[in-house]
Structures are given as C-alpha cells and as structure tokens.
Amino acid sequence: MNIAKPLAKLDAPGRLAIGKPVAIVDIGSNSVRLVAYEGLSRSVTPIFNDKLLAGLGRGVATTGMLPRDGVEKALGALRRFRTLCKIMEIGDVHVIATAAARDAANGKEFLAAAREAIGAPIELLSGKREAELSALGVVSGFYKPDGVSGDMGGGSLELNEVSGFKLGRGVTLPLGGLALSDVSGKSPKKAVKIVRDALADCKPLEALKGRSFYAIGGTWRALARLHMRQRNYPLDVMHGYAIPARDAADFAALVERVSTDALIAIESVSSARRPLLAYGAVVLDEIIRRARPRDIVVSALGVREGLLFERLDAAQRRLDPLIAAARDLNVLRSRAPMHGEELCLWTDDFMRSTHFDETEEEHRLRHAACLLADIGWRAHPDYRGEESLNIIANAAFAGANHAGRAYLALATSYRHLGPDADVNPQIRTLASARVLDRAHILGAAMRVGYLLSAAMPGVLPRSPMKCTKNKLLLRVPRDLADLVNDRLQGRMKQMARLIGREPEIRVG
C-alpha cells in the first residue's frame, strides 16, 4: 500500500490571518476556565474552551476562607491550562481572578500558588472592574444594546447600565450562587430576603424599566437552557435568547418552588450546577420584581470578551459584530468573497428601486445574508440549502437576535432551494410574516444574481436589477448576452411574482 508521507507542518487555511491566538484564563468563584481565541478581532471565535467547576467560592461568605479541595482542584486545572497553551503555541495569555480570591483571607496565598501553576501574572479584578468588563462583553456581543448587564458568578453579582457604547457606574453585590447558598443556610426561601435587601438601593436597576436585562453567567445560562427545552425551542444557541420578563418571572418562581430533579430537561444541566439553579432563579425573580425590565436576554459574552474588546482600537470597536462575523465566514467559506460584497451593493440598488420600507436592522441583516449566501457551496447541490441553514442557525457569531438569525438562515436556504421551498418549519416559527416575506424576496433576488454571475465578481456591478413602475428589469451588458436563457427567465419570473411586477431582461 502506498501511503503518502505526512508533511512536516500543514497550514490551516480555515483560519483567518488575524495574528496569533490569544487566551484568557478566568479563575472564578465556581469555575476555572480557559478560553483560547483564534485571534484578536471584532468577531472573536474560540478555538478551544475548557473548564473545571472547582467551587473556590464555596464557604467563603461564612468562613472567609477558600476551601482546600477547591484550591487543589483549581491549581490542578491551572497547571493543565498552562500545558494546553504551550501545545497551542499561545504566548498571549491573560489570567484574571474574581470574587472568591478577592474576598477570602487566604486569597493572596492562593494567588501566589496560582501564578506559579499557570506561569503568568494574574490580574485580581475589583468588583467595579468586573462590572465594567462584563458590560463591555455585552457591548461586544450585541448591536446597540440598551439596558443593564448582570453577571452572576459563584461569589458576586455585577450590574452595570449599558446604552450603545456607553456604560454606567457598575456595582458589585455579594449575590453569587455559592455565596447565597452559604449565607442562607442552603435555603432558597431565606435567600429571597437577602437578595431583596441587597437590591433595594441598587442604582443600575433604577434605569432598567422597559429595557433589556442582559443575563451573564453559567447559572443563568443553565436556567435559560431549561426554559428552551421546556418550549421545544428550535435553536440551541444561547446568545441572544430572549424571554419576556413576565414569563421569566413565572419560570424563576417554578425553579425556586420545586426540586431540580422534577424540572423538565434537567439532564441538560450538569450535576455540579444544579444546586445553584434555585439561587439564580431567586436573584432573577427579584431583579424583575424590583426593576420591571421588558425582557431577559442571555449573553454568552462577558468579562473575557470584554477584556478582548477593550484591547481593540477605536475603529475596530465601532464595527458591527454581525457584519464582522459574516465577513469572516465569507472569507473562509465562499468561492469568491468579493462576490458577497458586490451582492450587498447590488441588492442595495434593487431595494432602493422598490421603495420598500427597510429599517436599519433589516438593512444590516440583508447585508449579512449576502455575505453568508455562498458559505454552503462545498456541499452536494441538493443539500446546500440545508447546509447553509445549519451553519447559520448554529454559528457562534454575535450581533443578531434569534429572529434575525432565523432570517439569515431562511434567506440563504431560499437562495439555494427557491422561494417556494418548505424550509425548516421550526426555524420559520421564529420569524414574523414580514421577516419571512423579506427572506423570500432576498432569496429569490440572490438566485437571479448567482445564476447570472456564477458566484464570481465583476458581473453584478454591470447588471443592475431594478424596479420600474410595473416591471422588474434586469439589464445585461451586450457582451454577456449569451447568459440569458430560459432558466434565468424562470428565476426572474419567480422574483417578479413576489413583488407584484412583470419581469423583463434587457440586453445592451
């Protein structure tokens, strides 16, 4: 058998040329985590993620000391993370520690041992600094966020107002899950009064009424996952999952009241995380009662991503996170990335000619869809629509809510399958009638553009498609006249039918 010899070293063409990878090690009150990212960019992508639930903060609120077994577990994890960073050739490692190490009497002793274990300096975050970084994580992960960020860890809760790129003055409260379990004597009922008293004069919550509360932290993500599973929700992506405040309060009350083992889909939550669910529910319920937010929005981005966002220059920070992520995927997966950029401009001209009312949000989603339109081309032609939908529905990008993600997935599917295709009924439940209509129209327009251009740049700028009073007119330059055939005519008919016009292809 003739087996090819392996090369000494292979490049990874599926990686972006954005510099060397970076890593953050987060020594929290409940978990110790390593996240390695592809590089420093507006749309950060993890290439490795590992954690250990060490429970460092267990007992700190009552004994004032980090538990010995938790310290040993944490140090073991840090030594492992050090080795992993060497394997991944990551020289840029930022290590942070939060409430447990900050509050414990033996915190300094632990940090000295931790520095030796990880082989890097450790930044001990103040509560105010932690609140600032958590809020920056929300800024990095949402388009024009508006509300209050809340990062609930094992030892503390950090709150901060967020409005676009502006942050308020953050506060930290001793309301982490482990801390509440300790001071309440493991009684969620007793924890209610503790939380209520602590939140009574909380300044950031005074600005929350009618706005979004951005929930950060593993306990709240676990609660949201349970809520998803009870609804048989069609997406598994946590980031951007939104729950109306009244519904969230009712669900939190249920979690407070019943045994965790009785909850539907409890198997989706790790056994180590389950004892903290009731305390997360208590805090969330009291925030809703006290501040009356419009909805609870899960943020998968927090302190770690806030640190990376802070390191970007001003121009990078101002970029739209969704468009940045779509451009990255376009570069990595499309046949000709410039074609996606041209498709944005080509559909801009088309949309202006229709005089359709297009909101700012719809405009940015349309551009993202154009950039993502060709990412499934390597699949078999019969499955490109399904491949594209699955990539978009599950991609780790930020900057789009779940209705927007559904639009992106549906538009790219219709681009491959046609506007009459019965595309994923579950995903369609996330889209309004208007969103579905716009996805149909864009998908049909992209079908015309791709057939005309063979997914290559240079054709669309010379072949505008625009609406006149009663026609949908596609102009094809004379040197490309041979591209006009029955199949292109058929796609123009499909497109024209969706917008109530007669199709015409004019050569010359």
Image (cartoon, rainbow, N blue to C red):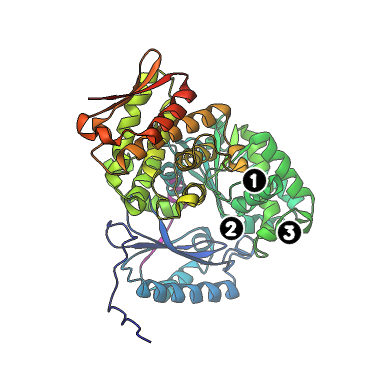
Q: As drawn, is 440 to the left or to the right of 295? A: left
Q: Label 1: which residue?
A: 233
Mark 3 residue type: Gly
Estimate the spatial distance between the alpha carbons at disc 2 and disc 1, rounded to whole Å: 28 Å
Q: Where the C terminus falls, by quadrant?
A: top left
Q: Which region is colored magenta?
A: 121-132
- Label 2 belongs to which residue? 154
Q: Position of residue 239 (x, y in %)?
A: 52, 47
Q: Disc 2 residue type?
A: Gly
Name the foreground residue: 383 vs 324.
383
Please rate how many residues cluster around mark 1, counting C-alpha atoms within 10 Å: few if below 14, some from 14 to 19, many from 20.
some
- Marks 3 and 1 sit apart, C-alpha to C-alpha, by 35 Å
| Farthest-out residue, left | 479
Dot 2 or dot 3: first in sequence order is 2
Q: Nearer the viewer, mark 2 or mark 1?
A: 1
| Foreground disc of the pair 3, 1 | 1
Percent position of residue 153, x then y: 56, 55
Is 149 displayed left or right of 185 in the figure?
left
- Residue 87 in percent (x, y) is at 37, 75
Give the vertical position of 5 relative to 404 (above or below).
below
Examine the structure image and report whether residue 386 is included in the region drawn in magenta.
no
Name the kind of residue labelled 1 in the image.
Tyr
- Provide the residue designation for mark 3: 185
Q: Quadrant of the N terminus?
A: bottom left
Write the residue at 51% across / 61% down: 28
